[in-house]
Image: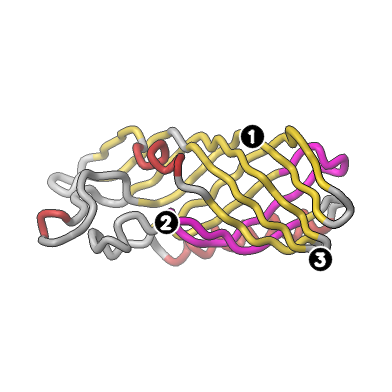
Amino acid sequence: MNLRFRTALVLSFLSLCCFASAQEHKLRTGLLSSLKGAGISLQIDSPSGSEVDVINLYADIYGLPTGRTSDLGVVLSYSHNYVLKTFGNSDVSAALYSGVGVSLGYVHDYEKGVFSKTHERLLEKRMGGILCLCINGGLAVDFERNLTIDLSFSFNPGLHIRTESRNNSLKVSPYKLGVYQLIIPQLSLLYRF
């Protein structure tokens, strides 16, 4: 992925942060960590607190820890979520939320095998773009000292678009990894403004 594309993604994320902070919304921003990858997260509450927009930008590490590739992907996801239930006391409050949005990125897709012992286990498919529906759900716990811990899961059915390595033809296939990674949680540590 070229430097211009990465720079555009980061600038887009930062402009969203500036826009959100200028509005009358509760804003949370911080780090996202998962077995999928690591990155930054932004959450913007509606003035009433009944809705929350979640924007994540993270490095996708599929195949990297197991030695199957040296490529690092990038994913930008947005979801508009509705708060389903809130509970807590004066020190700690929690909100259960769920919603839908979109995910875009440049990543590898799932391939059989786990570890790379020989060159036979390296990922054969090239990296490609993804266009996915992002179905998100989670639990956000707000602590008294402006700290929020968010545990969420995302389901990303969609398309993986890449060129074949043999003949450079365009290949469009279902994005399998977006479905398989449903069981992998995402943990975000956020600061509340």
Q: What residue is pinned by disc 1? A: 99
Magenta-drawn stretch, dominant element (helix, strand or loop): strand
Question: Which of marks 1 and 3 precedes in the sequence?
Answer: 1
* Residue 148 part of the magenta segment: no
How many numbered tags mark residues here?
3
Task: Name the residue at 87% across, 44% down.
Answer: 47
Q: Earlier in the sequence, mark 2 or mark 1?
A: 2
Three-letter amino acid code at the position of disc 3: Arg
Q: Which residue is mark 2?
A: 60
Q: Crowding at label 3, few (<14), some or many (≥20) Cα neighbours within 10 Å?
A: few
Boundaries of the magenta span: 28-52
Q: Is residue 127 left or right of residue 33?
A: left
- Which amino acid type is marked by label 1? Gly
In front: 4, or 148? 148
Q: From the viewer's perspective, is the residue at label 3 or at label 1 nearer?
A: 3
Spatial CA span between label 3 and label 1: 27 Å
